[in-house]
Amino acid sequence: MTAKNKGNIWAHAALFLVNTLYGASHVLAKGVMPTYLTPSVFIFFRVLGATLLFWLLLFFIKSNIIERKDWFRLVGCGLFGVTINQLFFFHGLNLSSSVNSGIIMAFNPIMVIILSAFLLREKITAIHLAGIAIGAIGAILLTLTGVRSVSETSLGDLFLLINSLSYAVYLVLAKPLMKKYSPLLVITWVFTIGLAFLLLYPPVISELAVTDFTVIPADIWMKICYVVVGVTFLTYLLTMFGLKHLSPSVSSSYIYFQPMMVIGFAYLFLYLNLAPDYTATITLEKIIYMLLIFVGVYLTGKPTKKTNS
């Protein structure tokens, strides 16, 4: 096995772990918003905490200096990958529904494919297109069979669409940087720039000033720490590593695993008595849709002579 193949295997494992962490968060990290933290304050905690962790880790690792010509792309990564991505997702989810969220996010890999073809000249094969389509169908059907709730406003759906598009732009912008620099160096500056942009959003400071941290119980603090360390710090770092070895379209296709992970963790956390029983909604129909997702991700990540992933 060549070094490139080993790197690809580890990259796939990293992306699978990313969506495992995301899947666990859907079950574990409930009850934080809006009872204890507003979306803006929660986002601030996520970005600030992850930024500090990235700089702490970078302090112990030797890295090269980013060239001046790459700073414009890096600023774009911070804006689209952190600030716009986080703000529009949390506020969109607050206005929309989890069903709409799942459907809209399923189109993220399609957006990535289109942007990659135009901006990176990435060659997309018929197999990869079929994989994206099958995965999207499975994810949408799996989401639709979940708990149905009516969207509060179409504005929330629009916010989620902007969130999905911004993350697609981020993946495409970050790919050339991954070829040139270490993932840790890139993501550290991405979050630092994203934090700077986030502080320019007025509600962050005003809502932070009136937040009563004394009423937050220990179990909620543990959930907040999990979101900061697991769902922000580790997921973004592992995504950067995956993007170094794989194409943006392959990296984004792993988002289809998230609904499956939510179901898996629903069983696990029920068994461990860490969460309420969400397993009553799991049916054979949903298992079939999960198999569709597996097939879709496999086809999307299947190496061919025409791909550059």
Image: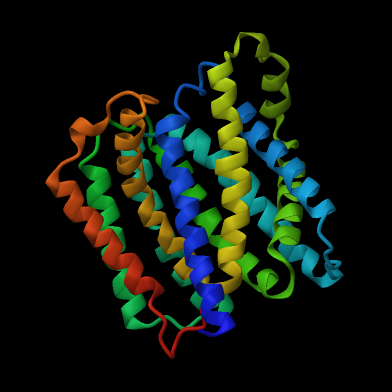
Asked whether the viewer can see residue 148, the reply is no
Find residue 98 and report its horizontal and vertical position in percent. Answer: 35, 36
Find residue 167 and report its horizontal and vertical position in percent. Answer: 54, 55
Find residue 137 and report its horizontal and vertical position in percent. Answer: 25, 59
In the displayed structure image, the side of residue 297 where residue 179 appears, left or right: right
Q: Residue at x 79, y 54 (%)?
A: 58
| Residue 68 position (above or below residue 263) | below
Find residue 50 and report its horizontal and vertical position in percent. Answer: 69, 42
| Residue 309 position (above or below residue 298) | below
Asked whether the viewer can see residue 251, the reply is yes
The image's colouring method is rainbow
In the displayed structure image, the side of residue 278 where residue 247 appears, left or right: right
Q: Residue at x 38, y 42 (%)?
A: 101
In the displayed structure image, the side of residue 56 where residue 177 appears, left or right: left
Q: From the viewer's side, name the closer residue of 125 and 19.
A: 19
> How many numbered badges does the structure rendering display?
0
Q: Residue furthest left?
A: 284
Determine the image quadrant of residue 173.
bottom right
Q: Residue at x 67, y 40 (%)?
A: 47
| Residue 50 position (above or below residue 137) | above
Q: Residue furthest bottom?
A: 305
| Residue 143 position (above or below residue 290) | above
In the displayed structure image, the side of residue 277 where residue 28 appears, left or right: right
Q: Residue at x 46, y 71 (%)?
A: 114
Q: From the viewer's side, name the closer residue of 224 and 161.
A: 224
Determine the image quadrant of residue 225.
top right
Q: From the viewer's side, name the closer residue of 210 and 262.
A: 262
Determine the image quadrant of residue 209.
top right
Q: Residue furthest top?
A: 215
